[in-house]
Image (cartoon, rainbow, N blue to C red):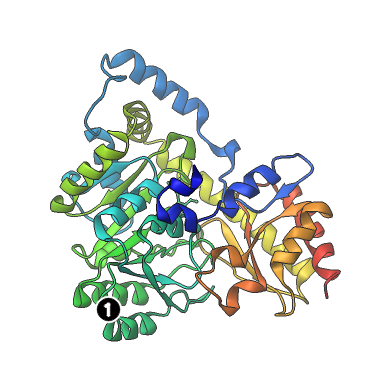
Amino acid sequence: MAQQLATWTQLTKRSALQDMLELTSGSEYISFGLGLPNAEFFPTEQLARSANEVLLQQSNILQYAPPTELLKQQIQLLMGQRGVHCSTSQIFLTAGAQQGINLLARLLLDPGKTVLSEEVTYTGFLQVLEPFQPRILTVPTDPVMGIDVEQVEKILQTEERPACMYVIPSGHNPLSYTLSREKRQRLAQLAAEYEVPIIEDDPYGFLEYEDIEIPAIKSFQSDWVFYVGSFSKILAPGLRLGWIIANEEVIEKLSIAKEATDINTTTLTQQIAANFLQKDEFTKHLLYLRQEYSSRRNCMLDHLSARLGEVGSWTSPTSGIFIWVRFPEYINTMELFRESITTEKVTFFPGNVFAVGQNQISTSSIRLNFSFNNHDKIDEGIARLSRLVKRHI
Ligand SMILES: Cc1ncc(COP(=O)(O)O)c(C=O)c1O
């Protein structure tokens, strides 16, 4: 039967993320692998109160329904913090950022077309591309400086016009960089000049730790940038809520693609989130998250310095939930990972998982998540990682 499925399914394989989920569920593991927010920080009680209110007060809450205007108004206010000023008619609600990327890809791509991506990027984007089997033009990137904007321009000057470019400007997954204001501005100009839409995937844009809030790329160019937001990392991923900001013409097409996918985003969770956001507890919640996550980031950085200072180098991210660690080139982190599963039982993602084709920056690197574990677990996990790595030095 598998032979009869669509051609792209023959060319794809199960994602390493799924394998990781299964492998690391035992309590003997310390997981720095998945990009999970910490469940302790979900505002469960407040959300329960909101759920209670909306279920009891709104008679049609469990009915099919159009997108919730109140939630769009709250998102409109939030986007002001990212420098984006839009009307609620330019906000499209989705079941998370992943769905946002998926719907946009369906709007922008014809099978076999060309897409521009960094040489190391979020695997969820690559999965979205699979049914279209596009030619991927890869751009060099760097864990600190981010996407090489000059190379983007060179590619746009010389290659077939890509259907879109995909960018994660803040707290990049997996590289962890936050792109400078200048690079954002330049990317926005290039998008307009070469008429290549940018998918700006920004699930970490609100998790900023140094109070240097850099505006979204969308704030510099409204027509050629599609902004994708998410409540997964700042509220709870189980709500499955995100949004796209685009112009009204595009929103109309998105509605058609969305209806074909899941009819509408769950009204219940939209209303719960809107009720919670309206009470203005969210500002406090976000502040709390930023404090907690920056303290975990600092904890991981301190333990890395204390235990792996002589054998590796790493990023000091100013936003997001990841640190990118680089070891000497002779260390193959895929092998390190396989060994860790049976010996030290600390999990992480080998850089190769995120590579688009072969490249140097990924084979001896790993991505570590710092949001999921408490300080003690981070301490123990880095001690295990250090024992593992030192056996290979
Ligand atoms: C860069 C990036 N985009 C999108 C997503 C998916 O987010 P959501 O849960 O909103 O679908 C993630 C999740 O980890 C991510 O890291």
Identify which amino acid the numbered label 1 is placed on. Answer: Glu
Where residue 336 sits in the image (x, y, percent)?
75, 64
Look at the image and tell me whether residue 276 can be seen: yes
Taking 170 as reference, is 139 above or below it?
below
Local packing at callout 1 (Cα closer than 10 Å; few below 14, some 14-19, many 20+) is few
The residue located at (69%, 65%) in the rendering is: 334
Locate residue 77 relative to residue 321 in the image: left or right: left
Where residue 46 sits in the image (x, y, percent)?
46, 27
Residue at numbered disc 1: 160
Q: Secondary structure at mark 1?
A: loop
User: Of residues 90 and 18, which is closer to you in this image?
Assistant: 18
Locate residue 215 relative to residue 313 in the image: left or right: left
Locate residue 371 relative to residue 5 in the image: left or right: right
The residue located at (48%, 65%) in the rendering is: 121
Look at the image and tell me whether residue 205 can be seen: no
- Where on the picture, by quarter, is residue 219? bottom left
Locate residue 368 relative to residue 134 in the image: left or right: right
Taking 209 as reference, is 393 above or below it?
below
Where residue 205 sits in the image (x, y, percent)?
42, 56
- Where on the picture, by quarter, is residue 347? bottom right
User: Of residues 104 and 212, which is closer to you in this image?
Assistant: 104
